[in-house]
């Protein structure tokens, strides 16, 4: 019974893992995925399976008889082995697919960034074609700093801090939500928001079109400040933020000007992690093969030798 329950947990875990990864696929341009905790848990579960399920007990004669080749228990073990091997193999191919997707996105990013920068005139139509993603931008306008927000728990250079976002209104009307940069958290005052200077008047900024910042787990609504406006947030949705501020938000930019105003702008230049995905794929394929090898050794070869 415990073995069946363990296999049930493995099946549920792998299914939930794949569904969660599909939901996160749209955030690949913002951050890589770290699967090490999931992989460790599943590897331990499979190790338990291999030690206590594939390998028969050598201390109980009755149990050896019950698990003889072609017995009812032997067929159950074979079915469980094929299930585990098939699911780990499937996860291996899935990780290879993720690596290919990241490489394709990197190639797309590199090709689009050599195209001419988008200017105010390009945004006059108030539309955002898909082909503009990762395009360079050089626009003129002014900051709407009364709507500046801080996204919590964002890292840069292995440090935790905040992304600072401010709407930027173009001279011809449309508004872009700009990820202006990153600022470190004050360790002594975790809730303190470091002040950021915002240039006033008409300025020109450079950047690139990016998806909205990746969404993190959110336990509750942030505490309101500035007469109900949430300055500190965990996540941001472009359309919802546009409705909240009554601004015609068109897209999200990452500002790429030289670091200024106390903000760091060392954005990832590419979508990293393809090699990591290939490494995970190798682990899954190795686990798939190991499961079959252990079954063949303990449940076939050793039983034939003892006949």
Image (cartoon, helix red, strand yellow):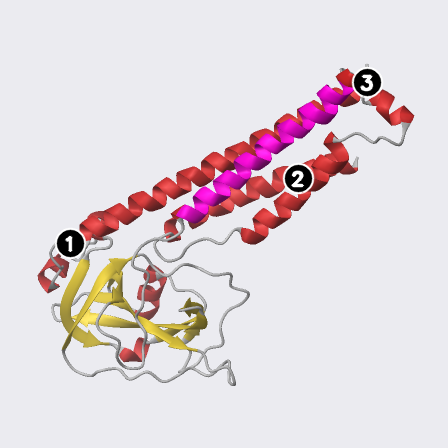
Residue labelled with disc 2: 46
At a point 81% along the width and 18% down the height, the residue shown is 306
Q: Reading the chain from its start, which is encountered first: label 2 or label 3?
A: 2
> What is the distance, in whole Å, between disc 2 and disc 1 at their CAs?
47 Å
Whether tag 2 and tag 1 are in contact, CB under 8 A, the answer is no
Q: Residues within 10 Å of mark 2 (few under 14, many from 20)?
A: many
Q: Is residue 302 left or right of residue 129?
A: right
Q: Is residue 76 left or right of residue 216?
A: right
Position above or below: 305 against 97: above
Q: Which residues are magenta?
A: 275-303
Residue 276 point in image, percent of width and height: 44, 48
Residue labelled with disc 1: 114
Front in this rendered view, residue 111 or 294: 294
Q: Quadrant of the N terminus?
A: top right
Displayed quadrant of residue 258: bottom left
Whether tag 3 and tag 1 are in contact, CB under 8 A, the answer is no
Q: Which disc, if any, is residue 306?
A: 3
> What is the distance, in whole Å, between disc 3 and disc 1 at their CAs?
69 Å
At a point 76% along the width and 36% down the height, the residue shown is 52
Q: At numbered mark 2, what does the secondary structure look like: helix, strand or loop?
A: helix
Displayed quadrant of residue 237: bottom left
């Amino acid at each position: 019974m415990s073995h069946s329950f363990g296999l049930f947990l493995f099946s549920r875990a792998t299914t939930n893992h794949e569904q969660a990864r599909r939901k996160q696929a749209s955030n690949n341009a913002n951050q890589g995925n770290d699967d090490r905790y999931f992989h460790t848990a599943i590897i331990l579960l499979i190790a338990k399976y291999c030690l206590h399920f594939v390998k028969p007990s050598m201390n109980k004669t009755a149990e050896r008889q019950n698990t003889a080749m072609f017995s009812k228990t032997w067929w159950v073990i074979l079915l469980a082995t094929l299930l585990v091997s098939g699911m780990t193999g499937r996860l291996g191919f899935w990780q290879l697919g993720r690596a290919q997707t990241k490489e394709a996105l990197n190639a797309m990013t590199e090709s689009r960034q050599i195209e001419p920068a988008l200017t105010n005139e390009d945004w006059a139509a108030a539309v955002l074609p898909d082909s503009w993603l990762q395009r360079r931008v050089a626009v003129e306008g002014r900051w709407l700093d009364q709507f500046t927000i801080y996204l919590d728990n964002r890292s840069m250079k292995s440090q935790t801090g905040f992304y600072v976002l401010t709407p930027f209104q173009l001279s011809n009307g449309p508004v872009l939500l700009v990820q202006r940069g990153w600022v470190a958290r004050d360790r002594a005052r975790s809730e303190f928001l470091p002040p950021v200077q915002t240039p006033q008047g008409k300025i020109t900024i450079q950047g690139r079109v990016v998806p909205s910042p990746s969404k993190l787990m959110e336990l509750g609504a942030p505490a309101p400040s500035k007469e109900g406006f949430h300055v500190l947030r965990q996540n941001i949705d472009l359309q919802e933020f546009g409705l909240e501020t009554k601004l015609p938000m068109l897209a999200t930019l990452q500002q790429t000007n030289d670091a200024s105003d106390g903000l760091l702008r060392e954005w990832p230049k590419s979508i990293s992690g393809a090699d990591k995905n290939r490494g995970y794929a190798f682990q899954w394929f190795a686990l798939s093969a190991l499961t079959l090898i252990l079954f063949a050794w303990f449940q076939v070869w050793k039983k034939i030798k003892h006949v």
